[in-house]
Image (tube, rainbow, N blue to C red):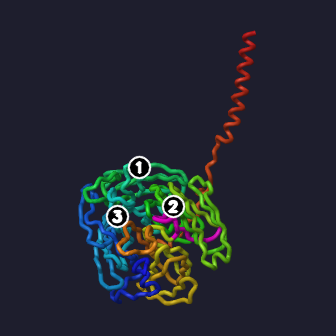
Amino acid sequence: MIIASTLLLLAGMTFKSMPTDAQVSATEHVYYGYVPTPTFTVDEVDELIGGTRITYDVPANHAILDVVGLEDGTAVEVWDLFLKHKIQSVVVNKFEKKVIYIYQGTYFKITASKRIAALLSGGISLLLYDWDDPSGTSTFYPAVTGGFRGKEFIFNAAPATHAYAYSVDRIGYNFYLMALDETDWTLTDSVQLWSASGHLPPRGTKTTLLQSRIASMGPHGGAGNDVVFHLTTSSDVEVSCCALGDFLAVPAITGGYVGKLFYAPLAVTLEEAGRTAAFIAVPLEEGEVRVYDKNLNVIATHSFTASDVSDRKYWYYELGSGRFNLIAESTSNMCFMVGQTEGKADISHLGDDVTFIGSRPGQEIRFYAPTNAVIFAPQNLTITVDGSSPIQMEKDEFKLLEPGAHSVSADKHVIVEVLAYGSAGTFFVGIEWENWGSYLIEPLDVDINFEALENFLTKQVDYMTYITPAAVAVAVVLALFVIRRRRARGA
């Protein structure tokens, strides 16, 4: 029997966990996640911490959870939800990073006394410039103030490259800055030994490769003297890592994961059979969707009817290979996802990667799960899945969903991890999750609202279009005048 993963064996079941004395207060920040199994493990990895190269061993079959402090004195605990025990507790300061190992197959919960930036990754994506397969992961970096849009970001740079990095065209960028309005920006490493700055117009982008985790003793061309970075801007921006083999739920520019305007970079720089960039638009209401490039040239359009919405239909569109800066605009609310296939150009072969999406109390979200999905309940709640009768979930329970399009709504916050296995499509013995990762989200990331943008979808006026004909006419008149003067003098 072929199965997608051990998740499929458990699909549809729910699990209660965490003893009463481990429940967190409403003032603490809570994050959830799952480590897919089996997960490929790299034995030794290196990274720069304060300019010093550190080598450490990764336990077999473990993923790495990088916890970066956004404020001093942040207490962090990681709990195994199924076994009901504490995996580790640490205290992290601002700009400091702590590494926690989590075993494959673990459903876990993080509680933090203050907001943190938590990156979960596994497989070859733990390193750079090694092996024969693509590596890296695509993810949005969370803003210090919550959500994925803001003026300040403190983050551990996610890995993004592959073995053919001898060419800059083959490198995935783990700093992908998108200006939502005209902005000045300054980026420094956490030890302030390296910095860069610049200015961007609306929809302008800045890309570079930053220091990240690498193969033990391997080379690295990324900027900086540390793996933690600090970005400040004069107006709101979004920041992401754009790599091969990815799958990503895109946050709405106005906040949360439901909206009418989305932006996402997407790159397929390794041309091979079965690999294509793609996006998925999932409507919550009838309406029209337009997808543009960053110059607002229309790539594709699609209309959804009321029956499409009731049938949970979606729009899957393949883009081929190349680098894309996708802007998706809809006349009504929708959810938007991007990624790329591996092994076969088919929606079931997106990834391999994991991504997170969340809903606010009373809000419906819709998404496509190529392999599986895990619903986490941060509070006791009543939830409706795929239009079924409402059911109760207790705090810290998780529920597993099978592949396909899903609709989720509840009276409290819901966090969902979506899994995309990629090249195999279905799980075969001996094939492992090799290349995955994402920043985790908390209810604050879903709750926060942002103002609509006035200039984002406005094309810059090319005044030369109007000036050039007039200038040519003036030049012709002046030329004729000069010729006549010269003829008159010659006479």
Residue position for label 3: 124
- Mark 2 and mark 1 in contact (Cβ < 8 Å)? no
Of the image marks 1 and 2, the number of the one nearer the N terminus: 1
Give the residues drawn in magenta, as a range: 331-347
Neighbours of disc 3 within 10 Å: few (<14), some (14-19), many (20+): many
Residue at the outermost top position: 491
Depicted 43 relative to depicted 456: above or below: below
State yes or no: residue 406 in magenta. Answer: no
Q: Residue at x 43, y 68 (%)?
A: 352
Q: Image check: 471 left or right of 238?
A: right
Residue position for label 1: 168
| Image x and y of residue 436, in percent | 39, 67
Q: Image check: 410 left or right of 77?
A: right
Q: Element at badge 1?
A: helix
| Image x and y of residue 232, in percent | 43, 57
User: Which mark is drawn over residue 277?
Assistant: 2
Amino acid found under the numbered disc labelled 3? Ile
Total marks drawn?
3
Quarter occupied by residue 209: bottom left
